[in-house]
Amino acid sequence: MEEVRKGQYSGIGGLAVLEGVMMRNKDKYAVAVRRPDGTVSLRVAHYRALLEGSILLRIPFVRGIFVFIDSMRLSLRSMNEATGESEEEVAARKEGRQEKWSDKLMMAGTFLLSFALAIALFVVAPYFAANLIASYVRSAALLSVFEGIIRILIFVGYILLISRLTDIRRLFGYHGAEHKCINCLETGHTLTLENVREASRLHKRCGSSFVLFVMMVSIVLFFFIRVESIPLRLLLRIVLLPVVSGISYELIRLAGRNDNLFVRILSAPGFAMQRLTTREPDDEMIEVGIRSVEAVFDWKSYLQDTFGYEA
């Protein structure tokens, strides 16, 4: 979680899920989902971070690795909860029982499959695509730049392709609702439907911006890889991903805490990407976002302590 610039409260972070929004504040998170009958299902739970309390989470360029892993774990859990869960399973979690091994294995399998597909699409494919022109480009440095550009183009093309799906367009709407709710509070406005409507759907700490930072940082980092073996080059690209994630986390953290000219320039590509991964939400989407925020965050006390007035 990012700390806000004023006050003692931690800023909330969120995630769009199928027909809903997940919001997290410290170790508490809520998943609010709009059901087919029009009602809103709300589930609140606690999440224990992978290295909770560890000194590693305070070390720059190292903490980002574990924050990224935790974000992936919580994202998979939230998406699973959004697709439906029995009342018995919800009650078991609230009583502190452990998750079923079958659920853990399914979550691990989903993560590994997603990771493998991402590596194939965004690491392996750009490398071989760039090497198709290796005979025409003698500079290894220039080839690395081409590889990075191809990686970004594949990502943008992927987003444009899936955005044609109705479910994904709605998911992007909930993504917009998540950002609007957070921006509404961080700009000092009460969390009402009218105020959230007027808030921006773009946010500096967005996961879309983080992914783009990862791709841009990888261009610079891979620029310095000088090995002849193709398998070793690919292996180094995969092994260095945690390093890339750690650097990218510090950049997005910097962007979230400052608003100078350098940060605005740094954030501009991420904002451009968010114009693809978010859509203007309807009022029902905003209501779901508000429900998820209120379940984990005392926003009235936050506004009073941070901006000096009662909501």
Image (spheres, grey):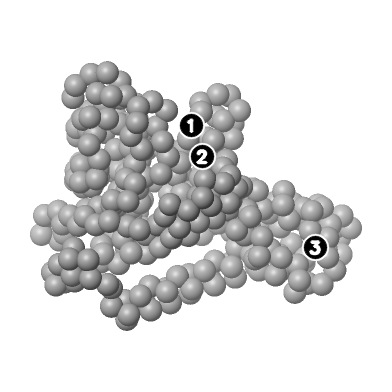
Assess whether mark 1 and mark 3 are in contact (beta carbons under 8 angstroms): no
For the question of whether residue 279 can be seen, the reply is no
Label 1, secondary structure: give it.
Answer: helix
- The residue pinned by badge 3 equals 133
Q: Quadrant of residue 180?
A: top left
Give whichever of 262, 91 is nearer the camera.
Answer: 91
Give the residue drawn at x 32%, y 81%: 102
Where is the C terminus found, in terms of image quarters? top left
Check the image and report above or below for 190 versus 30: above
Side of 259 relative to 229 (left or right): left
Give the residue drawn at x 75%, y 67%: 233
Number of dots carrying numbers: 3
**Amino acid at circle 1:** Arg
Q: Tell me the distance, in whole angstroms, between the alpha carbons under discs 2 and 3.
A: 37 Å
Label 3, secondary structure: give it.
Answer: loop
**Amino acid at circle 2:** Arg
**Amino acid at circle 3:** Ile
Residue 264 image offset from top left, x and y in percent: 55, 29
Side of 159 relative to 289 (left or right): right
Residue 177 image offset from top left, x and y in percent: 30, 43
Q: Point out the frontmost of discs 3 and 1.
A: 1
- The residue pinned by badge 1 equals 257
Residue 261 image offset from top left, x and y in percent: 58, 24
Assess whether mark 1 and mark 2 are in contact (beta carbons under 8 angstroms): yes
Other residues around mark 1 within 10 Å, as few (<14) / some (14–19) / many (≥20): some
Q: Earlier in the sequence, mark 2 or mark 3?
A: 3
Q: Earlier in the sequence, mark 3 or mark 1?
A: 3
Give whichever of 204, 177 is nearer the camera.
Answer: 204
Q: Point out the frontmost of discs 2 and 3.
A: 2
Residue 253's label in the rendered image is: 2
